[in-house]
Image (cartoon, rainbow, N blue to C red):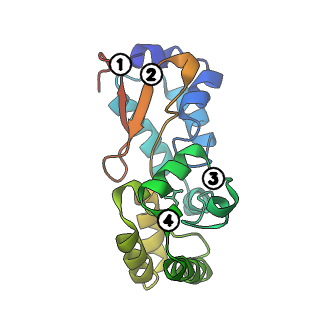
């Protein structure tokens, strides 16, 4: 599948593939679908970022609030999305000691109380010690700094399986980077 195939997806199929490009925010790909045709995957990535950047601050905070806590209730009850589960597992969030888990829960609550949205970090790019340290440090920031930082950290991802549509994989390489890999021939 290449960008030409993406460009002919119905909006239903497009949302199937990219629906969780930003955690639990299918509105984003549903809106970005109208920007077709995309000249490349990079252009698709840019359209997603432009849509997010154009949101009012309340919309950006809404995106953050759709994120599950790290090592939080959804992880414990098995209700994370598949993508989030993979991300959190990669950072070792499913294997915290009881001391680490207690510290994470306390800091997550402190952060939410201070800012009114959850602490968001790209779990794929961090290990648990770094996450705990950043959570503790970022609790000291100003709200506007954290709103911007949380949005920058928000992982971009797509449906790995997307079975009926072929092979799409998404790897997060850096903040704000939707990095799609697919069958040879995908032009970025
Ligand atoms: N709160 C938070 O950062 N959640 C997440 N981060 C991430 O990479 N996946 C998540 O679910």
Q: Secondary structure at mark 1?
A: loop
Residue 44 occupies quadrant: top left
Q: Nearer the viewer, mark 2 or mark 4?
A: 4
Is residue 99 visible from the viewing direction of this image? yes
Q: Residue 80: give its label.
A: 3
> Separation of disc 3 and disc 1 at Cα?
28 Å
State if disc 1 and disc 3 touch (CB < 8 Å): no
Q: Secondary structure at mark 2?
A: loop
Q: Residues within 10 Å of mark 2 (few under 14, many from 20)?
A: some
Q: Say above or below: 162 vs 9.
A: below
Q: Is residue 182 left or right of residue 7?
A: left
The residue that disc 1 covers is: 183
* Disc 3 Cβ-to-ligand 1 distance below 8 Å: yes
> Separation of disc 1 and disc 4 at Cα?
34 Å
Q: Earlier in the sequence, mark 2 or mark 4?
A: 4
Q: Nearer the viewer, mark 1 or mark 4?
A: 4
């Amino acid at each position: 599948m290449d960008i030409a195939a993406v460009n002919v997806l119905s909006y239903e199929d497009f949302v199937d593939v990219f629906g969780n490009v930003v955690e639990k925010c299918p509105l984003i790909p549903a809106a970005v679908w109208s920007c077709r045709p995309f000249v490349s995957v990079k252009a698709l990535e840019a359209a997603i970022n432009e849509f997010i950047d154009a949101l009012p601050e309340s919309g950006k905070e809404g995106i953050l609030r759709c994120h599950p806590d790290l090592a939080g209730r959804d992880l414990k009850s098995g209700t994370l999305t598949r993508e989030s589960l993979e991300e959190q597992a990669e950072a070792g969030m499913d294997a915290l000691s009881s001391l680490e888990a207690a510290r994470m829960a306390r800091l997550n609550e402190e952060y939410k109380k201070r800012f009114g949205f959850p602490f968001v970090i790209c779990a794929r790019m961090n290990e648990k010690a770094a996450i705990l340290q950043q959570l503790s440090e970022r609790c000291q920031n100003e709200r506007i700094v954290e709103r911007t930082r949380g949005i920058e950290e928000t992982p971009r991802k797509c449906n790995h399986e997307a079975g009926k549509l072929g092979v799409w994989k998404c790897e997060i390489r850096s903040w704000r980077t939707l990095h799609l890999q697919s069958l040879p021939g995908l032009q970025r």
